[in-house]
Amino acid sequence: MALPARWLAEPAALYVALPAETLALAGAGPTAAMALTIDQASEWRARDMVGAMVQGEGSIFLLDSLGSGAKTAKGYIFCAGADLKQMSVDPGGMMTPRGGFGGLVMRERTKPIIAAVDGPALAGGTELVLACDLVVASKTAVFGVPEVKRNLVAAAGALFRMPRKLPRNVAMELALTGRLDFPAERAYHFGLVNVLCEEGGALDAAKKLAAQISENAPLAVRESRRIILEATDQPDEVGWRLSNEGIAKMFGTEDFTEGLAAFVEKRAPKWKGR
């Protein structure tokens, strides 16, 4: 799959798309979904793009590019990674203290993040996607880690997260070839992408997925996420221990009582997140 010509007209522009501002941050209540919109910056400014988000009241977060239905001159673009010009003069300036690249890839958190990807997510853009818990992508989305083409190593998580979410040989191919055209359809086939949609529809589809999650108890959602992350690739005894610890945490909470009461009374539960 070749990249459309509009994305290649200004190759340098593909590397000035790292999120720099937090926009469209909204939500209220323990089960609200909050959206963080990426602003395409013309220069690097080290900002923690998820700090306010993961500390907010929402329990599910959407990582979007340029807002719903917005386009750049080259079409939809999610994020094309770091500004290589900035890297040439200040290699460490692209990191944030708590989250590393983009404030996200190393960020410790308990709340799930859904990436809503329209257009290319390249280099650091792919690594931001890999750091999210769920991925919704349109058919215009492409992924790739081209760092080897510039004598760089994909150091924001791709080299160990890709083989967890893709077959190892596929991850190896992407890392060693530096190809920029791994399509959303193939990513969906291998399970990296949860929901595949039409161009321009990623944010709306991500909102629908978030709505399904937000119907559930936030304490249980966060604990289930933690157990999956910690138990994957571990022996069964680790999984059993974490699962037993997780269910024990739910007993005695207000939401545990509410969940049972709502079931008995045949009504929708009213979660409090405690």
Image (cartoon, rainbow, N blue to C red):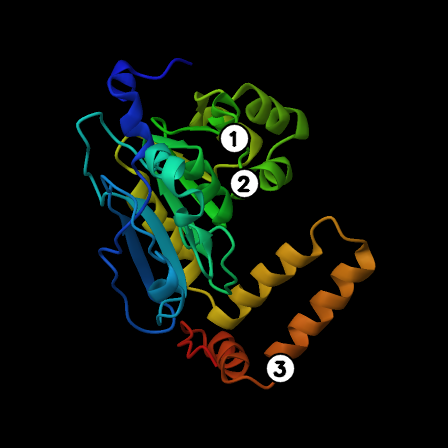
Picture disc at residue 152: 1
Dot 2 falls on a residue whose secondary structure is loop
173 vs 271, nearest the viewer: 173
Sequence-first disc among 1 and 3: 1
Q: Position of residue 188 (x, y in %)?
A: 49, 31
In the rendered image, which quarter is residue 199 located in? Answer: top left
Label 3 Cα crowd, 10 Å radius (few <14 / some 14-19 / many 20+): few
Picture disc at residue 189: none
In the rendered image, which quarter is residue 235 located in? Answer: bottom right
Q: Position of residue 28 (x, y in %)?
A: 28, 71
Q: Nearer the viewer, mark 1 or mark 3?
A: 1
- Residue at coordinates 47% horizontally, 24% vertically from top-left? 150
Picture disc at residue 251: 3
Q: Nearer the viewer, mark 1 or mark 2?
A: 1
Dot 1 falls on a residue whose secondary structure is loop
* Rendered view: 238 above or below 144: below
263 vs 205, nearest the viewer: 205
**Which amino acid is tagged 2?**
Ala
| Horizontal relation, residue 232 to residue 270: left or right | right
| Circles 1, 2 touching at the beta carbon (< 8 Å) | yes
- According to the image, label 2 marks what residue? 155
Find the distance from the CA under tag 3 to the CA under tag 2.
41 Å
